[in-house]
Image (cartoon, rainbow, N blue to C red):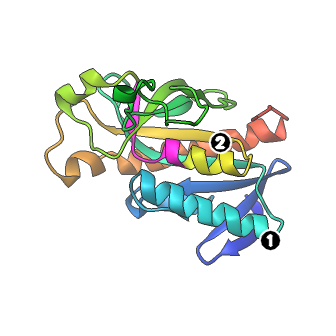
Amino acid sequence: MNDLDQTAPGHAVEAIGGRRVLFVMAAHAEYRDKLKARIRPVMTGVGPIEAALNTGIALHALHLSGLVPDLVVSLGSAGSRTLEQGEVYQVASVSWRDIDASLLGFTKGVTPFLDHPVDTPLPTPIDGVPPARLSTGSDIVSGVRYDAIDADMVDMETFAVLRACQRFAVPLIGLRGISDGAADLHHYDDWATLLHVIDERLADAVDRLEAALVAGVPVD
């Protein structure tokens, strides 16, 4: 990574493979030594409201400065009952599990009066990082609650980051490491135990993304 363009204290737009890339993460607990050696992300806070708010603020500031990135990358942890624990996946599509206006005749998962699909496809340009479908929501998912979710993995931010990116016409890539889901969650350590492993594997995925951009792989 090089040629950092400072956009606000604590984060920067990285110039990678001829593209300007803004990285976005939710929690400092996920941002460890391997990633710190590579990127300076926007730290949004946890959940869809914080993610949309702070990603939007960052992109607006960049827009005013004439520095809107070519690409945003949302990365961090996710839960899954079926995917390999500790492994990193590219987000093949993202949905929003919280929105349900079906009592008024709208399709569940679609925001009323907005033209978006239930599942929005995202680019998956990184060789060697498997794709998986993601569901974003404001709740922690565990145990039988996975039964109601039509996706491979769950998080609390990516759909919200996507909506901010769409407002500024910037493509989004999602990278998620599976931190939990094989067993029921009961306390903080059930989520945090694998974060050091995910840090290493997300850092490797960032390196692979750089290689893909250098090779000219399309991301939009």
Identified by mark 1, the residue type is Ser
Residue placed at 77% from the left, 62% from the top? 2
Where residue 27 appears, as percent x and y from the top left, is: 41, 59
Residue placed at 50% from the left, 36% from the top? 112
Where is the N terminus found, in terms of image quarters? bottom right
- Name the residue beneath numbered marker 2: 172
Q: Is residue 133 left or right of residue 128?
A: left
Which is more N-terminal, label 2 or label 1? 1
Q: Quadrant of residue 40?
A: bottom right
Where is the C terminus found, in terms of image quarters? top right
Where residue 28 appears, as percent x and y from the top left, is: 42, 63
Q: Quadrant of residue 212?
A: top right
User: On screen, 110 above or below 42?
Assistant: above
User: On screen, 220 above or below 108?
Assistant: below
| Dot 1 alpha-carbon crowd within 10 angstroms: few under 14, some 14 to 19, many 20 or more | few
Q: Nearer the viewer, residue 191 or 198?
A: 191
Question: In the rendered structure, does residue 59 fall within the stretch colored magenta?
Answer: no
Where residue 211 appears, as percent x and y from the top left, is: 75, 39
Q: Nearer the viewer, residue 106 or 123?
A: 106
User: Could one spot residue 40 in this view of the protein?
Assistant: no
| Dot 2 alpha-carbon crowd within 10 angstroms: few under 14, some 14 to 19, many 20 or more | many
Residue stretch rendered in magenta on the structure: 152-160
Q: CA distance from mark 1 to mark 2?
A: 20 Å
Please identify the residue farthest to the bottom as the structure is shown.
9
CB atoms of marks 1 and 2 within 8 Å: no
- Name the residue beneath numbered marker 1: 65
Identified by mark 2, the residue type is Leu
Q: Nearer the viewer, residue 215 or 164?
A: 164
